[in-house]
Image (tube, grey):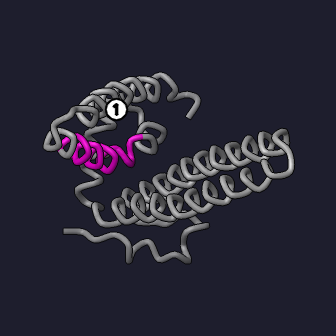
């Protein structure tokens, strides 16, 4: 990945630009435009799910990696969507539980001492941020394993027992 850093940074610039544009659509007052922005955001997330593994494993630029990711997505749309939604949903539940627990514990701590409430609230915030980092890392590992399987038809050793071939649906 280190040797491909310029291409990764190029993709990051493209992704950030698209992200800003999509966020601008989502912030509009018109419900239809906000809905369109959200739909485009989901499509962008799914279409770019394999960009980083493509960039790291092949000597191509960010635009070509984006095209390759879209091509791979078309062939493996089922598992890309299921993996993205599955990881997102699982972490949404875990994060919601952590936020609720953090708020309740902070309120309880405030009953005893304001300083303790600040400490508990800060630790809860750190826990939620760490969950986000873990979700991102897990998504990266999943996308790398999926990329390898989609391109070589061979699951990485740690994923062989998951039977990735059942996750891939070729149309």
* Secondary structure mainly formed by the magenta segment: helix
Please name the residue shown 34% across and 46% down the image: 45
**Residue 32 vertical position relative to residue 72 in the rendered view, above or below:** above
Please name the residue shown 72% across and 44% down the image: 121
Residue indicated by mark 1: 19
Side (left or right) of 127 relative to 55: right
Please name the residue shown 38% across and 77% down the image: 166
**Residue 76 vertical position relative to residue 24 in the rendered view, above or below:** below
Q: Secondary structure at mark 1?
A: helix
Side (left or right) of 133 relative to 18: right
In the foreground, 120 or 92: 120
The quadrant of the image that shows the N terminus is: top right
Residue 18, percent across and down? Answer: 30, 30
Residue 28, percent across and down? Answer: 22, 32
Residue 163, percent across and down? Answer: 47, 77
Please name the residue shown 71% across and 48% down the image: 124
Asked if residue 60 lies in the magenta stretch, the reply is no
Side (left or right) of 47 relative to 59: left
In the foreground, 130 or 123: 123
The quadrant of the image that shows the C terminus is: bottom left
Residue 51, percent across and down? Answer: 38, 41
**Residue 96 vertical position relative to residue 35 in the rendered view, above or below:** below
Asked if residue 42 lies in the magenta stretch, the reply is yes
**Which picture quadrant has residue 62?**
top left
**Which picture quadrant has residue 74?**
bottom left
Give the class, few, some or many, for how many residues have Cα within 10 Å of label 1's Cα (few <14, many ≥20). some
- Count numbered badges in the picture: 1
Identify the magenta region: 36-51
């Amino acid at each position: 990945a280190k040797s491909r850093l310029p291409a990764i940074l190029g993709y990051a610039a493209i992704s950030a630009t698209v992200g800003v544009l999509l966020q601008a659509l989502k912030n509009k007052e018109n419900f239809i435009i906000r809905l369109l922005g959200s739909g485009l955001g989901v499509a962008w997330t799914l279409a770019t799910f394999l960009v980083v593994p493509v960039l790291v494993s092949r000597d191509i630029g960010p635009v070509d990696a984006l095209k390759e990711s879209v091509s791979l997505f078309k062939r493996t749309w089922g598992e890309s969507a299921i993996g993205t939604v599955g990881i997102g949903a699982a972490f949404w539940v875990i994060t919601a539980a952590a936020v609720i627990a953090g708020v309740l514990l902070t309120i309880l701590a405030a009953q005893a001492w304001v300083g303790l409430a600040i400490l508990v609230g800060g630790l809860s915030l750190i826990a939620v941020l760490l969950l986000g980092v873990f979700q991102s890392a897990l998504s990266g590992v999943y996308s790398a394993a999926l990329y390898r399987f989609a391109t070589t038809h061979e699951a990485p050793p740690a994923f062989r027992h998951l039977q990735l071939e059942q996750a891939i649906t070729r149309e």
